[in-house]
Image (cartoon, rainbow, N blue to C red):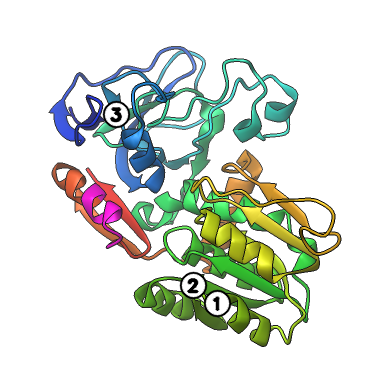
Amino acid sequence: MKALQYTAFGEEPTVVDIPRPSPGPGQVLLRVTAAGVCHSDLHIMASPPEEYRYGPLPLTLGHEAAGVVVSSGPGADRFPADTPVLVYGPWGCGICRSCARGEENYCTDPAGVHPPGISVAGAMAEYMLVDAERHLVPLRDLDPVQAVALTDAGLTSYHAINGSRHRLGAGTYALVIGAGGLGHIAIQILRALGASTVIAADVSEEKLRLAREVGAHHCVIANEAAADEIGRLTAGAGVDAIFDFVGTERTVGLAGSVAATHGDIVIVGVGNGALPVGYRRQPFETSVRSTFWGSRSDLWEVVDLARAGLIRVAVETHPLLDAPTAYKRLAEGKVFGRAVIVP
């Protein structure tokens, strides 16, 4: 079968021919119908050898996966052949307290979380192995190309917002920093879950146009004047819930400068920015947290929102042979919404 693999440090990913896998005990083999392209993959491929902490090379990329069940190994019998499914990505041990709550994204096993496309072979291939049936969510009538980003971009956004739902009542303000792949989904989730006025901030006018299309009430260019503009929009009261999908020093600085008393700041992006926390460093009662992916139950809820027509992902599609081009477009900031590989 064909697969997109990261084969050597510093090299671009390439499409190669590898053997088709067979499911072992408890595993499920999927024919991949859609695989999402994500900035996390760029971080993996940009890691120097001394900092690389992902799966052994060559690594089949792709941690957003949709597919159809082909066959199952001994002990796996919940999903008949031809069942369309989505794949929950942060695979934990399944036994620890966090996993017992469905929070495999925060698995406490010493071996850690083993996501496909990050630690083990992923979805950028014609077929992929899923380690356990509990990581499958029925797709039913949803389009896999539309839905595949729900497994990371949607799930990560939902998990970040869900922890701040108590801040999203009438008369409050929510700020989404970064209106790209995750941000444009987050705006829709905010509109679906709360009554906040939603503000989007981004350096790109094109991405702000997308933000407006999916429901942002106000859009602000993320430049030196952004904090003043957001202050004007909130009549000086500040923002009650801030979701930073970039995470650089500049964006977390913006978040801290516009937070309201009792505000939530959620840093989702992996830009290595840090926000000082301490007496009078932020408004009183401000909470600052970082998140990683989401729980299994979160994914079921995100799928329900999509099935109800409350989330629609902006996508561009590429065949598997064109996957390297999709990553180039992503690195150049030319992807609006999510890029999806269709084997």
Q: Are marks 2 and 1 in contact (CB under 8 Å)?
A: yes
| Residue 109 falls left or right of residue 205 | right
| Residue 75 falls left or right of residue 124 | right
User: From the viewer's perspective, is residue 191 above or below residue 277?
Assistant: below
Per the rendering, the mark at residue 60 is 3
Q: Quadrant of residue 122?
A: top left
Give the residue drawn at x 30%, y 38%.
32
Specify the segment rendered in magenta.
Answer: 327-334
Give the residue drawn at x 27%, y 61%.
316
Local crowd size for mark 2, using a 10 Å CA cut-off: few (<14), some (14–19), many (≥20): many
Give the residue drawn at x 80%, y 64%.
283
Q: Nearer the viewer, residue 263 or 283?
A: 283
Picture coordinates of residue 25 (x, y %)? 46, 12
For mark 2, what is the residue? 222
| Residue 280 falls left or right of residue 16 | right
Local crowd size for mark 3, using a 10 Å CA cut-off: few (<14), some (14–19), many (≥20): many
Instruction: Return the disc, 3 or 1, that comes first in the chain's sequence.
Output: 3
Real-space Cα separation, disc 3 to disc 1, in angstroms: 40 Å
Give the residue drawn at x 43%, y 56%.
142
Q: Nearer the viewer, residue 304 or 260?
A: 260
Circle nearer the viewer, 3 or 1:
1
| Residue 297 falls left or right of residue 46 | right
Picture coordinates of residue 88 (x, y %)? 51, 38
Residue 190 showing in the rendered view: yes
Real-space Cα separation, disc 2 to disc 3, in angstroms: 35 Å
Instruction: Return the disc, 2 or 3, that comes first in the chain's sequence.
Output: 3
Per the rendering, the mark at residue 226 is 1
Picture coordinates of residue 93 (x, y %)? 60, 20
User: From the viewer's perspective, is residue 327 above or below residue 305?
Assistant: above
Real-space Cα separation, disc 2 to disc 1, in angstroms: 5 Å
Name the main secondary structure of what is drawn in magenta.
Answer: helix
Local crowd size for mark 1, using a 10 Å CA cut-off: few (<14), some (14–19), many (≥20): some
